[in-house]
Image: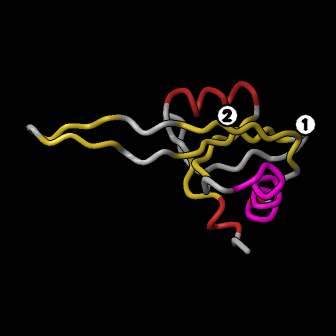
């Protein structure tokens, strides 16, 4: 059994993530790779005390990185877009840049 803080690893604070947050009332998180949409929904509702309308997930492949002659791959990770219901207060986890 994973705790809500193990499911939601960190918010994704990028230009795209903040734009989606402002325009579409959607939060963007890096989540545990084995987390389901139902677990993500319950974790967001428990942590932020806001009702969730929908959850979309995407598996992101790791990129190849080089350090001189040595090459390797970053780990694969999972991203979740969580849309809040209308009328719910938007949590502030990052100042909009």
- Which residue is depicted at the point 59% across and 45% down? 78
Of 8 and 65, which appears nearest the observer?
65
Q: Quadrant of residue 27?
A: top right
Q: Element type at marker 1?
A: loop
The x and y percentages for residue 30 are: 57, 48
Magenta stretch: helix, strand or loop mostly: helix
Quadrant for the N terminus, please. Answer: bottom right
Q: How many marks?
A: 2
* Magenta segment boundaries in residue numbering: 35-47
- Which residue is depicted at the point 75% across and 42% down? 82
The x and y percentages for residue 76 are: 48, 45
Q: CA distance from mark 1 to mark 2?
A: 13 Å
> Can you identify the residue that label 2 sits on?
21
Q: Residues within 10 Å of mark 1 (few under 14, many from 20)?
A: few
Q: Is residue 94 left or right of residue 28?
A: left
Q: Residues within 10 Å of mark 2 (few under 14, many from 20)?
A: many
In the depicted structure, whether residue 86 falls above or below residue 75: above
> Can you identify the residue that label 1 sits on?
86
Q: Is residue 89 left or right of residue 92?
A: right
- Which residue is depicted at the point 69% across and 71% down? 2
Of 33 and 12, which appears nearest the observer?
33
Q: Residue 81 magenta-drawn?
A: no
Q: Quadrant of residue 24?
A: top right
The x and y percentages for residue 9 are: 57, 58
Q: Is residue 63 left or right of residue 59?
A: left
Q: Quadrant of residue 45?
A: bottom right
Of 55 and 52, which appears nearest the observer?
55
């Amino acid at each position: 059994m994973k705790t809500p803080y193990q499911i939601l690893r960190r918010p994704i604070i990028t230009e795209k993530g903040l734009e989606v947050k402002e325009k579409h009332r959607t939060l963007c998180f890096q989540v545990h790779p084995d987390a389901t949409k139902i677990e993500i929904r319950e974790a967001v509702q428990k942590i932020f005390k806001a009702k969730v309308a929908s959850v979309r997930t995407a598996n992101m492949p790791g990129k190849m990185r080089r350090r001189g002659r040595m090459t390797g791959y970053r780990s694969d990770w999972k991203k979740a877009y969580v849309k809040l219901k209308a009328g719910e207060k938007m949590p502030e986890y990052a100042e909009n840049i």
